[in-house]
Image: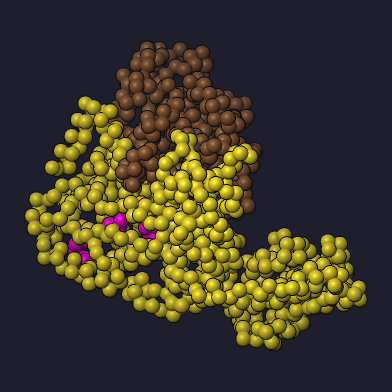
Amino acid sequence: MADLHAKSTLTHIQRLEAEAIHIMREVVAEATNPVMLYSVGKDSAVMLHLARKAFYPSQPPFPLLHVDTTWKFKAMYELRERMAKESGMELLVYQNPEAAERGINPFDHGPLHTDMWKTEGLKQALDKWGFDAAFGGARRDEEKSRAKERIFSFRTASHGWDPKNQRPELWNIYNARKNKGESIRVFPISNWTELDIWQYIRLNDVPIVPLYFAAKRPTFEWEGGLFMADDLPRLEKVLGYRPEIKERSIRFRTLGCFPLTGAVESAATTLNEVIQETLLTTTSERQGRVIDKDAGGAGMEVKKQQGYF
Amino acid sequence: MSGTDVIYQTEALIAEDIEAYLDLHQHKSMLRFITCGSVDDGKSTLIGRLLYDSKMIFEDQLAALENDSKKVGTQGQEIDFALLVDGLAAEREQGITIDVAYRFFSTEKRKFIVADCPGHEQYTRNMVTGASTADLAVILIDARKGVLTQTRRHSYLCHLIGIRNLVLAVNKMDLVGYSQDVDDKIIADYAEFAKSIGIETFTAMPISGFKGDNITAPSENTPWYRGPTLVDHLETVEVNSARDAQKPFRMPVQWVNRPNLDFRGFSGLVATGTVKPGDEVRVLPSGKTSKVTRIVTLDGDLEEAVAGESVTVCFADEIDCSRGSVIAVAANPPQVADQFETTLVWLNDEAMHVGRSYWLKLGAQMVSATVQQPKYAVNVNTMERIAVKTLDLNAIGVAEITTDKAVVFEAYADNRALGGFILIDKMTNATVAAGMLNFSLRRSQNVHWQALDISREAHSALKNQQPAVLWFTGLSGSGKSTIANLVEKKLHRMNRHTFLLDGDNVRHGLNKDLGFTEADRIENIRRVAEVAKLMTDAGLIVITAFISPFRAEREMVRGLIADGEFLEVFIDTPLSVAEERDVKGLYKKARSGQLKNFTGIDSPYEAPINPEIHIDTTVMTPEEAANVIVDKLLGDA
């Protein structure tokens, strides 16, 4: 940090970091009951690291909330517990009881799985604890409708998003004042790209789920995609048959529920190799996820209007 | 070197030496820019092209793009780059961009954030939003059409927001046969206009977003053009943050960092300048000075922090400093004032209310502010100054603003972070205006409060009562005056010192210059509120009977009166009942159109949401109502 010449113009990573920290501090100063949504993926990992930076030497003055679907990879649950311990932050886990009761799963229920566990689960969790501001790790480069979303994004009392009626956001001044029943979703890493995220993880040694790195893992093919058999007995139960398991060297570009997240065959076992592969790859990040394609070109936009993060 | 070569070399480096590639990219700087132009000037196509040429489009997106291009594209069988950036479903159908969208791409030297701004008149607010964070603006011109009204408007807005780097991209050169004459003519036209509004320099270049001319590589089609390509220029132009680092040190405090009794730090983003441990600093508005002892981050203490960094600063002394304070270099601090001349861009469907109290947020400072009638507005098409009574959606004007507390500020031209602000409607919480402080008015530095020896406590002690304001509100003919009279009589009998301010009576004297327009009604209430406030300082129980139809004004009064001394009394009479009584015959006149702006008829009444006292006159006699009010007042007092 003593390199004054390099400091006179900040690098893009330094500016993005400073912006995210500024946003988090604004929320903490103005919201009454903020929370950080923590999905255990790499974007969440970076967001958590930024939160620890923003308030150091204090602990981030809000809890972490994991809206769980019970279908996450085991390695994700492990990292979740570890990070909660390391950061000293309170970890809240919420599972939609109705989805649990009805046994909603991605194989039998398709889009309903995302709707019940994630969209409904998130709404219920925010209502349960009365959170008025929730940090999310969404990035504008992920998807078309995200590109138009404000950093402070308001939701109605029923958690709907109105893309045509967003507050103008000028300079770095954020209007965090809410009407009764409204809540805010705040996206501190809106302006980061996937490469920025990887770059930041590399520069700061941010702990991420090992599934991002290639390793020999049990896999099966399903509906044209390659998936990991993270919990074979459970998988068998919902599929109604035992899928053909084959050991392959795979990794994940994005992590969600294990049956919704496609794996890619890869030999990238180090961070540099992962980044290298990411840069040279020819498919975009979200392609591994089924959610965008649900409703044709407007998939995510429709989901967001319904309250999906 | 052509664009394709650059991509090829980059790929080779990624493949052969990823470590070297990442180290290279770690030291990139960042440039934020906006693109603006009319509906068909090709903004989305240009941005799509930049993403495409910098390899920000993946194969699956490309496949989807080719597919979409054939289905809904406007370029026949060729790739329609615009489809990459037109995100929302509604826009795809209409074929236009309707909101600010942010896009990202990088080259070897820089990361870029592009704000794609719509060209429609009704979306000025989106353009101002996009421009507020931009280092540079690309103004697109359709070579076939030349300088248009929208070109002028967008250039004016960029200049107004303080963007110094303007690129005039003469687009669609392929459609005019790459004619140098066409290019020259457009540049000459634009230069004349630019000069007239004070734009000192701009960089012009002939391009084709669709064909890729002069985007990443010099075009063979324009041998007469010797300037940089668009990407060359974007990669080398100076960014704002580099300039900000050269200015005096200022850091608005966002949050006081106090994990335990042994640590007290002040967290914020350095707006301008640099700071080091040992630096003498001054905290505004208190003006107290101290020395910086540490600059704390999770990665260890810093030897220096520069503009653009988020840090936590510790002082040698325990001085008053909290959210909204500004830490500055001691020898050269910013000013503090409460009256300003400002330039406002109105962003809300509801027009500005002269005299109404709005929240003003500047950095981390939040104060109440009232706006005077604009001195003038600017016609963004002709740049003429026009006389106006208010500012409507997308209007730009110059107006004076008064704040209820002193604000630490600098002129916007000198410091965006201390001179740019937003106005927020106190009722709807909407961001209604973007503002730029031009300068403070002398007045605010010359009018001081006269310190008085007999305090308000002394006044109220002598009268042996707690001062209060009973603020009656309700429709005309609801019974406000009748009940207010009874209340005052009762209090008088109980030896209380009271005064009744009645709507009609005040309009005969103090406010006889005011009519019944919305602006005049707001001013009427403001004056009454100030009088009521002086009377409570004198220890009196003030009773007011005004329709006071707007929630915002009643909240303004509440804010003016000391805590706990304001009681809102809602005289709740349904319109039908009030109209039937029609004691003064006013409803009849209003219905027949002889009386304009009559509350309940052609002007709204906003009922209180949570009044201290709620009187339903359909179930209570005036006598009973008066008893309820007196009991509530004295019970609370």
Q: Residue at image x 15%, y 63%?
A: B183
- Viewer-side residue, B583 vs B361: B361
Q: How many marks?
A: 0
Q: Quadrant of the N terminus of chain A?
A: top left
Q: Is residue B553 magenta?
A: no
- Nearest to the observer: residue B453 or residue A125: B453
Image coloring type: by chain
Relative height, residue A16 to residue A232 (above, below): below
Return the x and y of residue B264 as percentages of the image width and height: 58, 43
In magenta stretch: residue B139: yes
Q: Is residue B497 above or below residue B108?
A: below
Q: Is residue A193 above or below residue B593?
A: above
Tell me which residue sits at (76%, 65%) in the image: B565
Q: Give the x, y percent position of residue B246.
A: 35, 54
One can see residue A214 in this view:
yes
Q: Colour of chain A?
A: brown
Q: Nearer the viewer, residue A70 or B278?
A: B278
Residue B637, image x, y percentages: 83, 63
Quarter occupied by residue A133:
top right
B280 or A219: which is nearer to us? B280
Which residue: 31% across, 43% down? A5
In this rendering, would B598 be left or right of B134?
A: right
Chain for colour yellow: B
| Direction from residue B24 to residue B6 in the image, left or right | left
Q: Is residue B537 left or right of residue B627?
A: left
B122 lies above or below B543: above
Residue B437 location in percent, x, y?
Answer: 45, 66
Highlighted range, magenta: B127-148
Residue B605 visible to an observer of this rendering: no
Residue at 31 percent across and 65 percent down: it is: B155
